[in-house]
Image: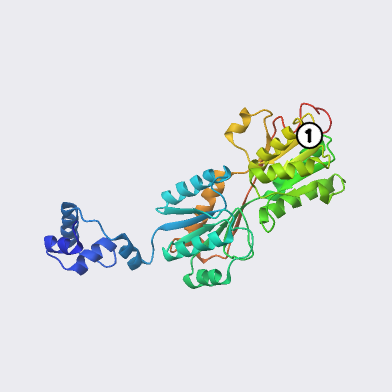
Amino acid sequence: MATIYDVARAAKVSLATVSAVVNGTAYVSPGLTTRVTAAIQKLGYQPNLLARSLAKQQTHTIGMIVPNIANPFWPEVVRGVEDAAHAAGYTLLMASSDDDRAKEALYLRLFLAKRVDGLLLTKAAGPLDPDLAAMLRTTRTPVVQLMRSSTALGGDKVLIDEREGSLAAVAHLLRLGYRRIGMINGLDQVSTSAQRLEGYRDALASWHVEFEAALVVRGDFRVESGHAAGLELLDRKPDAVFIANYLMTVGFMGALRARHLRCPDDIAVVTCDDHPWLDSFHPRLTTVNLPKYELGQAGARTLVERLEPGHPAGAKRARVVTLKTTLCLRDSCGCDLRRGAGA
């Protein structure tokens, strides 16, 4: 394999000249640049990318940590990040924390050690270790919080209007005449769970329906928790349920079958997040669609703008970008059963 020394000998120039051409760190005359470039191509020389990155203090890589890559919500978000990052000349490194703070800390340290230029982080539930917060401050690594907002971190945030989406879902059920509306929510200490609960409560209040704490059951965004929470909630006889994500809805549907209940005949369901295959299921699920691809793109672009030298965003204070949701009406909410019940 050819080395920088071989290139210098072939081009009859100094090592410093080859380095300046490869790394773009100093002016080299057009004639010498041509000789060096010709030697590189002839010898098939591959520059040391790590050394090149250290010289420029930039690796053109972005680190991304998501809570659970097995959740079908995240692949489309990652695709949006990757497409936007690639278009801007950045490579994506990705990890899944499984909503485990220790695993999250491990990946954060790894990404910082690899000198990523910036981070996209969907924070695991709970605080950030003080030593990690200090490392982020010391390295001055920009962090964009994606989907979840944590007071443990500063910087830019790219979020979804969870409260408004939840409010629209529950208000729709109320318009159809349901009054005992249960909720299966996600993890404690996660901003999305808090905001979805806020929207649920605001919708009830706007219809003068009393909030019952017993009708709200916690899950952890996974199938098994949706099943367990469903069995618990069904004992309390709701006539409709709003569920905070798709995986817990899969579990809840299993709980309905276990109790020999049907959706929407016996109980109506609205869930968070939409996927192309949901239109093929029976019943077809009414959902609050979360703009996944757009979330990823907006996160990557916000981070790239913070990284690019001379970009106006680099000098501005931290920003919050909030994307809107869409209510997709299908069968599981019981629209056909209750047509004309309200407007």
Residue drawn at (51%, 48%) of the image: 297
**Viewer-proximal residue among 228 and 162:** 228
- Percent across and percent down for residue 146 are 57, 55
Image coordinates for residue 128, horizontal then vertical, percent? 59, 66
In percent of width and height, residue 108 lies at: 50, 62
User: Would residue 327 appear left or right of 79 to someone viewing this image?
Assistant: right
Residue in the foreground of this view, choosing between 184 and 81: 184
Task: Give the residue at mark 1.
Answer: 267
Viewport quadrant of the N terminus: bottom left
Q: Residue at x 45, y 57 (%)?
A: 62
- The quadrant holding residue 11 is bottom left
Residue 338, compared with residue 125, is above or below; it is above
Callout 1: helix, strand or loop?
Answer: loop
Q: Quadrant of residue 70?
A: top right
Quarter holding the C terminus is top right
Amino acid type, residue under disc 1 in the picture: Ile
Instruction: Give the left or right position of residue 252, taking residue 146 as reference.
Output: right
Q: Is residue 50 visible?
A: yes
Residue 327 seen:
no
Left or right? Give the position of 174 relative to 188. Answer: right
Question: How is the protein colored in the picture?
Answer: rainbow
Q: Which class describes the residues within 10 Å of circle 1: few (<14), some (14-19), or many (20+)?
A: many
Total label count? 1
User: Would you place residue 304 above or below residue 170 in this image?
Assistant: below
Residue 73 at x, y = what percent? 58, 44
Vertical side of 320 occupied by 255: above or below: above
Q: Residue at (26%, 59%) from the top-left corner?
A: 47
Residue found farthest to the front: 258
Q: Nearer the viewer, residue 278 or 163?
A: 278
